[in-house]
Image: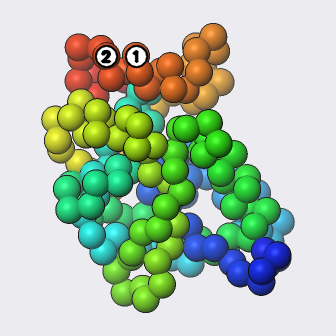
């Protein structure tokens, strides 16, 4: 695996569509083929965090430690190139997600995870009835709409704000 400029490999905890069997896992497969990612195993967050679904059944991990449940996901070692590709997918420069540290059970060193941006995280928690998931599974993903199948005249943040302002709950917004 290619190291970053400081000789470090980042560990990234995935909990949603980047996991095996879900739509965006194709990015992880591409990164593994190019030597920019290695699957390390299945892990669970040490602390409880809310894992909720937003517009189009997109999963969001909320940086509200102590709320929700311990979250199941997959851990990858990722090169700097791989991390840049993941940051682009997750929209870190556009205010979609924030890459922040997360402690995992049976792991000394914190990994990184993509959390919903703090500008709308609490609203997502409230919109989901202050209830979080422990895993994003096929059941939760039912109704997921791929990016290319969403209305293209709106940004992802527009979709989030429309979802938050709608009167329906997350479970009926598929």
Placement of the C terminus among the 4 image quadrants: top left
Real-space CA distance between mark 1 and mark 2, rounded to the nearest whole angstrom:
5 Å
Residue positioned most to the front: 119
Residue at disc 1, secondary structure: helix
Q: Nearer the viewer, residue 82 or 25?
A: 82
Q: Is residue 85 above or below residue 76?
A: above
- Work out whether residue 33 can be spotted: no
Comparing 44 with 155, the one in front is 155
Q: Residue 129 appears at what percent x and percent y?
A: 16, 35
- Please tell me in which quadrant of the rendered image residue 166 appears: top left
Find disc 1 in the rendering and name its residue.
162
Q: Position of residue 34 (x, y in %)?
A: 83, 66
Q: Quadrant of the N terminus?
A: bottom right
Q: Residue at x 77, y 80 (%)?
A: 6
Residue 134 percent coordinates (x, y): 27, 57
Q: On residue 147, which mark appears?
A: none
- 86 left or right of 164? right
């Amino acid at each position: 695996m290619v190291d970053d400029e400081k000789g470090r490999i980042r560990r990234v905890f995935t909990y949603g569509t980047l996991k095996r069997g879900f739509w965006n896992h194709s990015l992880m497969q591409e990164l593994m083929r190019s030597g920019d990612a290695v699957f390390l195993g299945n892990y669970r967050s040490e602390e409880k965090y809310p894992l909720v679904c937003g517009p189009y059944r997109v999963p969001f991990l909320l940086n509200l430690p102590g709320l929700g449940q311990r979250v199941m996901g997959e851990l990858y070692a990722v090169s700097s190139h791989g991390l840049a590709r993941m940051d682009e997918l997750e929209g870190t420069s556009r205010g979609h997600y924030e890459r922040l540290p997360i402690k995992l059970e049976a792991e000394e060193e914190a990994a990184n995870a993509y959390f919903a941006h703090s500008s709308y995280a609490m609203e997502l928690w409230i919109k989901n009835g202050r209830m979080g998931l422990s895993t994003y599974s096929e059941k939760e993903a039912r109704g997921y709409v791929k990016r290319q199948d969403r209305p293209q005249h709106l940004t992802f943040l527009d979709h989030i704000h429309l979802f938050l302002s709608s009167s329906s709950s997350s479970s009926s917004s598929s």
